[in-house]
């Protein structure tokens, strides 16, 4: 059965979530294109989620995304709809595409909707037991030639296969957030994954115009194998500052260093908030268990989760409070774990904290400005040279961070999670929007 046939009936479970909704838009577009080519065939895209309220919001989200897709690809669509003489204006083409795309979609919470699917995407929460139980239920009812693409961020694919009994019909298909925008797709084959599943995953990824990057089947893979350790190191640096600073002060300082001094898109604690403090904890749990590495654990994270300081996003995309509290996505407070409240980030306090870190090294430019700079590599080289010779507190900690980042990256290659140093850098530059990879000559 070729990919076109497999796309005749597809299911996405966890479709109303951050990742599932994006995957739904991507797959929905491909199915709509097939529908235009083969108007007499029936296509089904089943979007399943247990959260019925979120499913209602999903319809409008998907519709608005299809409109955007159609607007962007109007020339191609006009060609695809060349037989349809009734479509004259651009608006007619856009409406026809949205109608075709939505026409194949069924929304619901009943897993039986997936029974005839040939391709099943799983994007529910990162909890091993819940994922296994869901996959088992699906496997009991679905056809025995269905392929399972799991978006797990950390759970080994061979382990899932063994627990569920899919006999190699599963592969790790790790989209990055948001799937519609992010080019990177980490692909993880388990030791049992069938060649035809790998081929389908490759062909589909290419059709979706993603940058496919293989990672070995080791808990956390490359993306979270890196990110978890980077986050834990951030907390380690907070602890080092703690004899002289309060926890909120130290969190603010390390966040500022990891964003500004290291010229990254977000500071490490803002990034953990974005991903979700609880998600961070879940991934640590999985990695800790499968890698038998008890250092992959953190008391502060556990305390925050216990106090329901969870981060993540609201359904309208706004940031929920975590290490920081937010107003219109701007950080306005830092969580004080001892007092269980947010300490407001006031201008005077900020200036004082920044002065402790010292001036940014000469040649500093924000991540946003460097992103579009033609001479980005040289500018970074000069900047990091200056950082290396600076003696401010900010520069000293930033240097330690650069060293640790490189060490984490190299360790991922040594432990065979990544095939090469270049792959590690590719994940960080593409999946995390870094301007440079962690394995570099800046330190
Ligand atoms: N958020 C990210 O940045 C990111 C990036 C890459 C991979 N991932 C992975 O993608 C997966 C989904 O993450 P997310 O951030 O989209 O989570 P999310 O919480 O936004 O979405 C999960 C969705 O699954 C639904 N769900 C939960 N249990 C279900 C069940 N038994 N049946 C049907 N639906 C169910 C929930 O209602 C929710 O809508 C996880 O495995 C995560 O590790 C997340």
Image: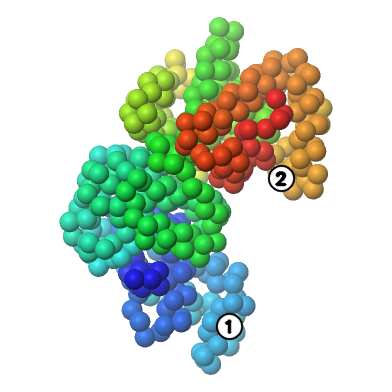
Viewer can see residue 72:
yes
Please provide percent x and percent y for residue 412.
51, 32
Question: Which of the two discs, 2 and 1, labels the residue nearer the N terminus?
Answer: 1
Q: Is residue 281 left or right of residue 378?
A: left
Q: Which residue is mark 1?
A: 79
Query: How busy is the neighbourhood of tag 1: few (under 14 within 10 Å), some, or many (20 plus)?
Result: few
Q: Residue at x 67, y 21 (%)?
A: 399
Please tell me whether residue 282 is drawn above or below residue 55 in the rendered image.
Answer: above
Which element is circle 2 on?
helix
Please provide percent x and percent y for residue 440.
67, 32
Q: Residue at x 58, y 82 (%)?
A: 78
Please tell me whether residue 171 is drawn above or below residue 82 in the rendered image.
Answer: above
Which element is circle 1 on?
helix
Q: Nearer the viewer, residue 56 or 116?
A: 116
Q: Residue at x 28, y 47 (%)?
A: 161
Specify the farthest residue to the top: 243
Please provide percent x and percent y for residue 102.
40, 72
Specify the farthest residue to the bottom: 85
Please provide percent x and percent y for residue 300.
43, 20
Q: Is residue 394 left or right of residue 108?
A: right
Q: Which residue is mark 2?
A: 371
């Amino acid at each position: 059965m070729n990919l076109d046939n497999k796309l005749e009936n597809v299911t996405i479970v966890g479709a109303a979530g951050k990742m599932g909704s994006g995957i739904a838009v991507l797959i929905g577009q491909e199915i709509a294109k097939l529908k235009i080519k083969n108007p007499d065939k029936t296509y089904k895209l089943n979007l399943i989620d247990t959260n019925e309220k979120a499913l209602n919001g999903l319809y409008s989200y998907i519709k608005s995304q299809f409109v955007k897709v159609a607007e962007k690809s109007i020339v191609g669509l006009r060609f695809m709809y060349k037989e349809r003489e009734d479509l004259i204006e651009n608006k007619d083409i856009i409406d026809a595409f949205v109608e075709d795309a939505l026409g194949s979609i069924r929304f619901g919470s009943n897993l039986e909707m997936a029974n005839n699917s040939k391709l099943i995407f799983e994007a529910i929460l990162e909890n091993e037991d819940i994922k296994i139980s869901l996959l088992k239920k699906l496997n009991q009812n679905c056809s025995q030639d269905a392929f399972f693409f799991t978006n797990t961020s950390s759970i080994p694919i061979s382990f899932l296969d063994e627990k569920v009994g899919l006999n190699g019909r599963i592969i790790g298909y790790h989209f990055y957030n948001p799937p519609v925008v992010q080019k990177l797709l980490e692909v993880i084959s388990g030791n049992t994954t069938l060649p035809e599943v790998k081929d389908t995953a490759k062909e589909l990824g290419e059709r979706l115009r993603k940058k496919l990057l293989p990672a070995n089947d080791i808990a956390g893979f490359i993306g979270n194998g890196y990110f978890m350790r980077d986050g834990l190191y951030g907390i380690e640096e907070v602890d080092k500052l703690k004899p002289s600073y309060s926890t909120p002060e130290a969190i603010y300082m390390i966040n500022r260093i990891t964003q500004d001094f290291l010229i990254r898109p977000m500071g490490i604690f803002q990034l953990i908030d974005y991903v979700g403090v609880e998600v961070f904890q879940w991934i640590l749990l999985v990695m800790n268990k499968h890698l038998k590495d008890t250092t992959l654990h953190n008391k502060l994270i556990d305390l925050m989760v216990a106090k329901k300081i969870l981060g993540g996003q609201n359904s309208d995309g706004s940031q929920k409070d975590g290490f920081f509290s937010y107003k219109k996505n701007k950080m306005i407070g830092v969580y004080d774990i001892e007092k269980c409240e947010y300490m407001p980030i006031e201008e005077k306090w900020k200036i004082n904290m920044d002065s402790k870190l010292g001036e940014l090294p000469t040649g500093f430019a924000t991540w946003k400005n460097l992103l579009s700079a033609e001479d980005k590599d040289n500018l970074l080289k000069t900047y990091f040279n200056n950082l290396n010779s600076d003696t401010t507190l900010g520069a000293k900690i930033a240097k330690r961070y650069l060293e640790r980042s490189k060490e984490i990256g190299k360790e991922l290659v040594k432990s065979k999670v990544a095939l090469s140093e270049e792959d590690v850098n590719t994940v960080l530059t593409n999946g995390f929007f870094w301007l440079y990879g962690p394995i570099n000559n800046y330190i």
